Image (cartoon, helix red, strand yellow):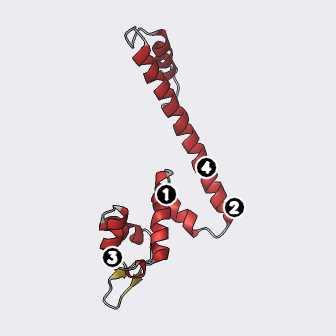
Amino acid sequence: MKSSAEMTIGEVAERFGLATHVLRHWESAGLLTPARQRTGHRRYGQADLARVAVILIAKDAGLDLGRIREVFATGDPMDRRDLLHGHLAELERRIARATAAKNLIEHALACPQPFDTCPHARAAIAARIPPEGAPAP
């Protein structure tokens, strides 16, 4: 394989298990800026590989491309902290919902009663019904 200083878009895509159109999309979104040959072909270096890895880590953390771009673009570390604190709060809400769902399913698997008659499940069902006149979530 060629050195990372002269990798093509296809080689980078294969190395990360991505489609080439994903790298092109990230470039059009302002997340990647690979060097170009005179012919216009992209060439990816070590810094580009690190950037792809950071994008993948951020996506794994649940950040969308817009937020990733904001993290990359901000010059003020406090702006980045505010963005990440907001995302952390959203992750904590999702984790709480997922944990409640997991607990309910574990209980349903262990409960000898049908789901709709189980007191534990009925409490969860009742809690999910919005009160009369309440605005929709």
Q: On the image, numbered disc 4 is attached to which residue?
A: 86
Give the numbered dot on residue 1.
Answer: 3
Are the residues tagged 1 and 3 within 8 Å (C-beta)?
no
Mark 4 or 3, nearer chain start: 3
What's the residue type where badge 1 is placed?
Answer: Ile
Q: Gap between marks 4 and 2, in whole Å?
A: 12 Å
**Is residue 60 depicted above or below 126 in this figure?**
below
What's the residue type where badge 3 is placed?
Answer: Met
Nearest the eye: 118 or 67: 118
Residue shown at 47% from the left, 64% from the top: 53
Mark 1 or 3, nearer chain start: 3
Mark 4 or 2, nearer chain start: 2
Q: Gap between marks 2 and 3, in whole Å?
A: 41 Å
Give the numbered dot on residue 57.
Answer: 1
Q: Is residue 96 visible?
A: yes
Q: Is residue 40 left or right of residue 96?
A: left
Q: Is residue 21 left or right of residue 93?
A: left
Q: Quadrant of residue 80?
A: bottom right
